[in-house]
Amino acid sequence: MNKDFDNVLRERFSKDSLISIATVDNRGIPWVRTVDAIYIDGAFYTITHNSTNKMKHISFNPIVAICGEWFSGHGKAESLGYICNEENKDLADKLREAFASWYDNGHTNEDDINTIILKIMVTDGIIYEDGKRFEC
């Protein structure tokens, strides 16, 4: 990944940020939704439920489109599994901290094993900052 591109993504999205994720269903129909996400080391992370349409779509086509705040691109999405799995502990702590303003408002149920971490590894994109265009 281009260092300047990554630096702008990190500066802009390394906190609770709204991004849009587009998926395609098994009939070829596109779907888009906005989620809270955080950018860490080349990927966006969000918390979702395994039964959502986005996860159904990702299960047969993990390539997604993403955009937000003068950024658009693509990524490869994957479930990292239950948020409370031991291997997710450090990442889950970062997500809880980033999403603290809404995390405990009843939307996130850590007692449900279908509450998962979704990782979207950025594969390509374009981002603008201060009149400059950065590509990956």
Image: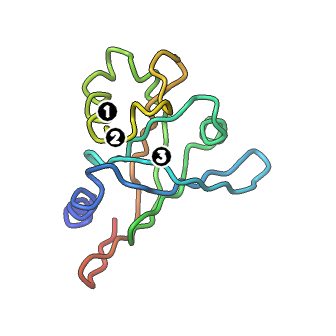
Tags 1 and 2 touching, CB below 8 Å: yes
Which quarter of the figure is the N terminus placed in? bottom left
In the displayed structure image, the side of residue 98 where residue 103 appears, left or right: right
Q: How is the image coloured?
A: rainbow
Q: Residue farthest to the front? A: 105
Total marks in image: 3
Residue at 58%, 29% (x, y): give it: 50
Q: Is residue 75 above or below residue 81?
A: below
- Tell me which numbered mark, 1 or 3, is placed earlier along the sequence: 3
Residue at 43%, 48% (x, y): give it: 36
- Tell me which numbered mark, 2 or 3, is placed earlier along the sequence: 3
**Quadrant in which residue 6 is drawn:** bottom left
Residue 65 spot, x, y in % from top left: 53, 57
Query: Relative to the observer, which residue lies in front, 108 or 129?
Result: 108
The Cα–Cα distance between marks 1 and 3, rounded to whole angstroms, is: 23 Å
Q: Secondary structure at mark 1?
A: helix
Q: Which residue type does callout 1 highlight?
A: Arg
Q: Which residue type does callout 3 highlight?
A: Lys
In the displayed structure image, the side of residue 1 where residue 126 appears, left or right: right
Tags 2 and 3 touching, CB below 8 Å: no
Choose mark 2 or mark 3, whichever is in front. 2
Q: Which residue is mark 1?
A: 96
Residue 99 spot, x, y in % from top left: 34, 40
In the displayed structure image, the side of residue 90 where residue 124 appears, left or right: right
Q: Which residue is mark 3?
A: 76
Residue 52 spot, x, y in % from top left: 63, 36
Q: Residue farthest to the bottom? A: 131
Q: Which residue is mark 2?
A: 99
